[in-house]
Amino acid sequence: MPFCSRILMMFFGVTMAILDILLLPVLRVRTVAYPVESVDESIRKLVDVMFESMYAAPGIGMAATQV
């Protein structure tokens, strides 16, 4: 279990949701993601959930447009 999930589980008794990861031939996978203009708490939570999803899936990485 990734570090962020262990911390959430230890202190709050919750785990994060696993996002569906899109794969080819879904066309959205080929789109270019927009840059993030400012990082706030909601972006940090999204990144944590994206890491959780990536670690739970087979493969070696994940692009922002895959979720």
Image (cartoon, helix red, strand yellow):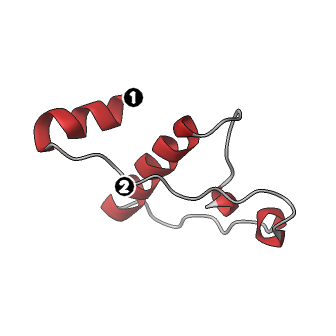
Q: What distance separates the C-alpha of mark 2 from that of mark 1?
A: 17 Å
Residue 67: x %, y % from top left: 61, 61
Q: Any mark on residue 1, and which?
A: 1
Q: Would residue 6 appear left or right of 17 to someone viewing this image?
A: left
In terms of secondary structure, where does tag 2 sit?
helix
Looking at the rendering, which quadrant does residue 26 occupy?
A: bottom right
- Foreground residue among 21 and 3: 21
Would residue 22 appear left or right of 12 to someone viewing this image? right
Q: Is residue 17 left or right of residue 8?
A: right
> Residue at coordinates 35% horizontally, 64% vertically from top-left?
42
Q: Residue at x 41, y 47 (%)?
A: 48
Disc 1: CA contacts within 10 A as few (<14), some (14-19) or many (>=20): few
Q: Name the residue under label 2.
A: 45
Q: Which residue is drawn at 84% across and 71% down?
A: 27
Amino acid at circle 2: Lys
Please provide percent x and percent y for residue 45: 36, 55
Foreground: disc 2 or disc 1: 1
Q: Is mark 1 on a helix, strand or loop?
A: loop
Spot the residue most to the right.
Answer: 25
Q: Which of marks 2 and 1 is nearer the N terminus?
A: 1
Q: How crowded is mark 2: few (under 14 residues within 10 Å), some or many (20 or more)?
A: few
Q: Front-most of 35 and 15? A: 15
Identify the residue at image location x=50%, y=42%: 51
Would you say 36 lies left or right of 41 here? right
In the displayed structure, 1 sits above or below 16; it is above
Picture coordinates of residue 4, whole percent (x, y): 33, 36
Q: Which amino acid does label 1 sit on?
A: Met
The one of 19 and 38 positioned closer to us in this rendering: 19
